[in-house]
Image (cartoon, rainbow, N blue to C red):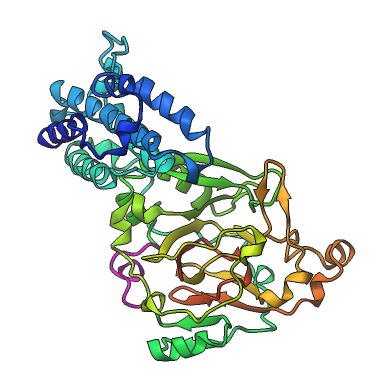
C-alpha cells in the first residue's frame, strides 16, 4: 500500500504536457498535492454548470485527481499511524482538528478511514467518470481491499445472523397473479449460430435466446444469485452506487441517491416483504467499469459483433437530433433491483442484447410502426427531450388506458417472460416495457 500510494502521488505531481488537466487554472493545480478538498468543491461546481456530456474534460480530470490525492493522504496518514496492526482500535480522541488535506485525526486513525477512501474514489468514478484515471483508482481500491481483508477485525465480518447473505429472499409479492399470461409470444431460439442470428436480424424482429449464458461464471462458480458473493466483490458492500428511488423514472415521486452497496442490499434487496411504493433500483449504470471484478464474471455475447442491417429508425438530419455515435465496443449497463422495478415504455438508440442473470422479468415490445398509438412524450421543463418515452403506463387499469389513451390498446405488441440464463434481442427503435417479477440482475449490451 505504501509503495503504491507514493507511486500515485508522484504520478499526480508529474503532469504530462498533453494532459487536459492543464486547461484548469494554474493556481488550482498548485494546490493539488496539499489542498485537494477546495479543488473537489471547485470542480464539483463546474460539473453542475454544464450538461454532463458537455463538461470540459479539465474539470472532470481535476475532480478525479483531487479525489485521488485526498484518498492517498488518508492512506498515508493511516499507515503512518501504524493502523496496519489493528484497524479496529478505537478512534484517537485527541487532536481532532481537520488538516489541510481534508482529513481529521479521527478519520485517519480509526477504522472509518477505509470507508472514506472508498467513498471519495467511488465519487470520482460516479461524478466524473474517473476521467483518465480508471486504472489508477482500481489499483488503489484493489490494494486497499486486500489490506482490509487481511487486517479488519473479526467482529466486522459477521455482523448478520448466519445464512442471512446466502440467498435473496422470495418476495411475498411474487404470486401467480403478478405474472402476466403471455398472449403474443416473442419468437424463441436455442443458442442460434452467428449466421442464423444475422439472418434473423434482417427481419427486424425481436428474438428470445435460450441456453446462451451457460458459460458465464456469474451463472455458476461466481454466482450473482449469492448476496454474499456480491458483497465480497463490492468491498464488503462499501462501494458506492447510484440508485433510483421509486417504481419508475416517469413517476412524480421518483428520485436518485448515491448509497453504499450494502445499504442498498439491506434496504431494498433482502426484505421478504418490501414496500412496493419505495423501490430502489440500480438502473442503467456502468457498474462494470466502476467495479472490474464483476466484469470478469460475464462475457460480451458474440451476437454483439454482428453488423446490423441498415435501419431508418435513427433520426433524419432534418429532425435536428444527432445520430447515435458508432460504437467501437458494446456499451454495458447493469440493472439490479427487487420485485416490482419498472422501466417504462421507451426506445433506445442502439440494438440491444438484454441478458438475464438472476430472476425473471416480464417484457413487452412494440414495433416502431406502432409509435403513433404509443403517445410519446415531448420536450419537458428544462429542455429535456423525453420523446423516446411513452406517456402510457403499459400495465395501467384498462379503464384508465381507454379513457386517457384511447389508441393504446389498438397497438400490436409481442411479449415474453425472460428467465435466468436467457437473452432478448431488442432491435433498435423498438419500444419496450420491462417489469421485474422477482429480485433481478440483468446486463444490457448496446451495439451498432
Q: Is residue 6 visible?
A: yes
Foreground: 281 or 6?
6
Question: Quadrant of the image for the N terminus?
Answer: top left
**Quadrant hosting residue 414:** bottom right
Left or right: residue 60 versus residue 318 is left
Q: Which residue lies furthest to the front in this view?
A: 318
Residue 330: give x, y in percent of width and height: 40, 66
- Residue most toward the right? 403
Numbered label tally: 0
> Is 175 displayed left or right of 214 in the figure?
right
Examine the structure image and report whether residue 84 is included in the region drawn in magenta. no
Q: Is residue 341 left or right of residue 290?
A: right
| Above or below: residue 259 compared with residue 194 | above
Q: Which of 57 and 242 is in front in this view?
A: 57
Residue 408, compared with residue 57, is above or below; it is below
Residue 148 picture location, percent across and down: 22, 39
Q: Residue at x 33, y 48 (%)?
A: 234
| Magenta stretch encompasses residue 215 | yes
Q: At 74% across and 80% down in the image, what residue appears?
A: 412
Q: Is residue 412 above or below residue 277?
A: below
| Percent position of residue 392, x then y | 75, 61
Q: What residue range appears in magenta?
A: 213-224
Residue 64 spot, x, y in % from top left = 33, 36
Q: Considering depth in this image, is 237 or 157 the residue closer to the camera? A: 237
**Predominant SS of the magenta segment:** loop
Instruction: Name the residue rendered at 68%, 58% in the picture.
Output: 387
Q: Is residue 218 left or right of residue 337?
A: left
Q: Residue furthest left?
A: 3
Amino acid at each position: 500500500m505504501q509503495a503504491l500510494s507514493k507511486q500515485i502521488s508522484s504520478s499526480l505531481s508529474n503532469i504530462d504536457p498533453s494532459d487536459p488537466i492543464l486547461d484548469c487554472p494554474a493556481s488550482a493545480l498548485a494546490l493539488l498535492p496539499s489542498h485537494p478538498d477546495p479543488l473537489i468543491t471547485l470542480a464539483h461546481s463546474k460539473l453542475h454548470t454544464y450538461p454532463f456530456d458537455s463538461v470540459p474534460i479539465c474539470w472532470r480530470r481535476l475532480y478525479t485527481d483531487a479525489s485521488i490525492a485526498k484518498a492517498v493522504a488518508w492512506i498515508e496518514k493511516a499507515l503512518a499511524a501504524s493502523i496496519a496492526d489493528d484497524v479496529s482500535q478505537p478512534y484517537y480522541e485527541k487532536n481532532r482538528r481537520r488538516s489541510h488535506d481534508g482529513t481529521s485525526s479521527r478519520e485517519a486513525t480509526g477504522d472509518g478511514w477505509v470507508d472514506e477512501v472508498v467513498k471519495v474514489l467511488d465519487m470520482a468514478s460516479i461524478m466524473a467518470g474517473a476521467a483518465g484515471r480508471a486504472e489508477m483508482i482500481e489499483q488503489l481500491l484493489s490494494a486497499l481491499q486486500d489490506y482490509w481483508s487481511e487486517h479488519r477485525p473479526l467482529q466486522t465480518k459477521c455482523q448478520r445472523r448466519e445464512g442471512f447473505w446466502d440467498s435473496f429472499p422470495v418476495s411475498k409479492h411474487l404470486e401467480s397473479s403478478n405474472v402476466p399470461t403471455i398472449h403474443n409470444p416473442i419468437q424463441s431460439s436455442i443458442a442460434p449460430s452467428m449466421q442464423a442470428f444475422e439472418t434473423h436480424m434482417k427481419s427486424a424482429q425481436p428474438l428470445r435466446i435460450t441456453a446462451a449464458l451457460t458459460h458465464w461464471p456469474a451463472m455458476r462458480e461466481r454466482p450473482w444469485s449469492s448476496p454474499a458473493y456480491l458483497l465480497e466483490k463490492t468491498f464488503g458492500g462499501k462501494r458506492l452506487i447510484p440508485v433510483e428511488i421509486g417504481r419508475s423514472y416517469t413517476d412524480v415521486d421518483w428520485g436518485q441517491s448515491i448509497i453504499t452497496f450494502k445499504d442498498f442490499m439491506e434496504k431494498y434487496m433482502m426484505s421478504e416483504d418490501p414496500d412496493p411504493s419505495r423501490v430502489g433500483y440500480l438502473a442503467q449504470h456502468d457498474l462494470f467499469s466502476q467495479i472490474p471484478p464483476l466484469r470478469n464474471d460475464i462475457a460480451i455475447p458474440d451476437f454483439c459483433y454482428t453488423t446490423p442491417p441498415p435501419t431508418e429508425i435513427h433520426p433524419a438530419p432534418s429532425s435536428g437530433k444527432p445520430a447515435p455515435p458508432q460504437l467501437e465496443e458494446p456499451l454495458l449497463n447493469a440493472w439490479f433491483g427487487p420485485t416490482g422495478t419498472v422501466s417504462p415504455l421507451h426506445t433506445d438508440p442502439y440494438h440491444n442484447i438484454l441478458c438475464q442473470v438472476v430472476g425473471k422479468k416480464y417484457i413487452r415490445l412494440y414495433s416502431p410502426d406502432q409509435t403513433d398509438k404509443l403517445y410519446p412524450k415531448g420536450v419537458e421543463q428544462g429542455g429535456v427531450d423525453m420523446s423516446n418515452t411513452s406517456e402510457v403506463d403499459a400495465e395501467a387499469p384498462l379503464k384508465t388506458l381507454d379513457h386517457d389513451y384511447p389508441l393504446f390498446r389498438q397497438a400490436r405488441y409481442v411479449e415474453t417472460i425472460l428467465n435466468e440464463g436467457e437473452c432478448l434481442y431488442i432491435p433498435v427503435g423498438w419500444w419496450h416495457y420491462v417489469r421485474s417479477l422477482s429480485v433481478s440482475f440483468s446486463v444490457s449490451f448496446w451495439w451498432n
